Image: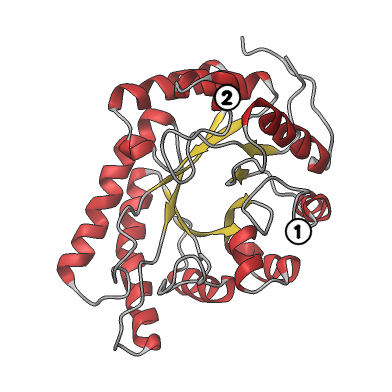
Amino acid sequence: MKDRFSMQFAPHLGLLSPDRGMFRAHAGDDPVSQVHFMADQGFTAIEDNWMAARPESVQTAVGRALRERDMRMGVIVNTMVYDRPTFVLDDSGERARLMQEVRDTAKVARRVGATYVTTLSGTAHPSLPRDFQTANMIENLKWVGEVAADEGLVLALEPINHKGWPGTFVTDIAHAYLIAAAVDMPSVQILYDFWHQQIHAGDLIANLNAAWDRIGYLQIADNPGRVEPGVGEINYASIMRHVAAKGFDGIVGMEFDSSRPGTAGELAVIDAMRGIDPRGPVPHREVA
């Protein structure tokens, strides 16, 4: 068993598909086997965009494996509806749906030990002025944030880039910060995805610093291609040193696929993550 990473890097069980876990070439298709492989490589967390869609028996088994291996569960996705206007509407029925969505997600989160849940803004309304939409989202998040707080969850509001997801309402960190600051609840924070922001705006460290007090979760991928660090244009070694120096002790999700297929590609991912871990490995101790 390899020494643990000093930062809580979280490989995924599925990025754009539930059956394409990051280390399936080594560990096979079973998510539990993938968790154990990740732990053996020194990872201390995982994340999964598809956890809510998996059978309850799989959710329970993954949660058990995480406890056995002393690992944390990173984000699971809360907002499975993101391709139409949702948070931007002043509509009591839609608000009730958003609140129930969090209650349903909480059942999954309890099985796997998740706290942060990815929350997407949905698309912009085609005719409602943008400022009204922002005001509606703030109001809706206050209601939904209360439910999240009652359920022990944090809504991780994620701005996503406009190229891959045209029409999305919240695309940049500044807008997300305005909304999170206006809601002003511990249960509503920002998910800062460096890959999305590199595509959308760049200036990654300056934007990170400006929004720091509202950021609860980080995700990484290199660009272009949404691949492992070191393949593209983002200097993740420098960024992770900066994040560590600021005292971040949360989870850093590895929201990418390997640039090469098979076991060789997966080993390259592990090497890439070792290369950007700013504090070096931590000797592993088995859980008593």
The residue nearer to you, when weighing 152 against 102, is 102
- Looking at the image, is 157 positioned above or below residue 15? below
Q: Which quarter of the figure has residue 98?
A: bottom left
Q: Residue furthest front?
A: 261
Circle 2 SS class: helix
Is the residue marked by circle 2 packed among few (<14), some (14-19), or many (20+) residues within 10 Å? Answer: some
Location of residue 286 in the rendering, given as x and y in whole percent from the top left corner: 67, 12
x 70%, y 49%: residue: 248
Image-based side of 178 in relation to 240, left or right: left
Name the residue that disc number 2 marks.
25
User: Which is more N-terminal, label 2 or label 1?
Assistant: 2
Location of residue 29 in the rendering, given as x and y in whole percent from the top left corner: 46, 23
Residue type at mark 1?
A: Ile
Residue type at mark 2?
A: Ala
Location of residue 102 in the rendering, given as x and y in whole percent from the top left corner: 30, 50
How far apart marks 1 and 2 lie (CA) works out to 26 Å
Is the residue marked by circle 1 packed among few (<14), some (14-19), or many (20+) residues within 10 Å? Answer: many
Q: How is the image coloured?
A: secondary structure
Report the quarter where the N terminus lies.
Answer: top right
Name the residue that disc number 1 marks.
234
x 40%, y 74%: residue: 167
The residue nearer to you, when weighing 275 against 174, is 275
- Looking at the image, is 188 positioned above or below residue 85? above
Q: Which quarter of the figure has residue 41?
A: top right
Q: Residue furthest top?
A: 288
